[in-house]
Image (tube, rainbow, N blue to C red):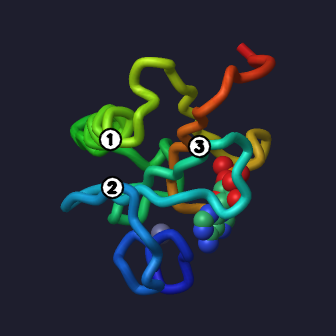
Amino acid sequence: MEDCIFCKIANGELGTAMIYENEYVAAFKDLNPQAPIHILVVPKKHYENVLAVDENDNIIAKIYSAINKIAKQEGFYENGFRVINNCGKDAGQTVMHMHFHIIAGKTLGEKIV
Ligand code: AMP
Ligand code: ZN
């Protein structure tokens, strides 16, 4: 995907500092943090959103495995955290490359669900 900012970040084209990275997944700080810790976890391959993930594809498991490692590495494994994925218009998805927000580092406020 040529003009996708998260493709460029995930594949190292912009020199973004990575919090975690492996063959399939990259994680970096959100530009506009909503909590003391706000990390985005994205696949290196372009998917528009979770609806683009085929049932035989294990990318979501790879993302959650990365989240587990990041939680240990960044020290919020014990206190807990929230993972958010926005999919499509009504959820307000603004970057059309699938990403999971990890929010942590404080007692989190109101939940929608
Ligand atoms: P969403 O509303 O779920 O699509 O979230 C997109 C998120 O990407 C927002 O929290 C933005 O702050 C974040 N974001 C947009 N551009 C960048 C960027 N270049 N680097 C890091 N985070 C970004
Ligand atoms: Zn992309």
Q: Position of residue 99 (x, y in %)?
A: 51, 51
Tag 1 and tag 2, C-beta contact below 8 Å: yes
Toward the viewer: 21 or 50? Answer: 21
Q: Residue at horizontal 71%, vertical 13%?
A: 113
Residue 73 is tagged as 1
Compared with 52, 21 (above or below) is below
Is ligand 1 within 8 Å of the beta carbon of the residue shown at mark 3?
no
Q: Is residue 103 visible?
A: yes
Q: Residue at horizontal 48%, vertical 43%?
A: 50
Instruction: Of the two numbered discs 1 and 2 on the same chain, state the one appearing first in sequence.
Output: 2
Residue corresponding to mark 2: 20
Res 66 quadrant in image: top left
Res 70 quadrant in image: top left
Residue 37 is tagged as 3
Q: Amino acid at mark 2?
A: Tyr
Q: Position of residue 81 (x, y in %)?
A: 54, 26
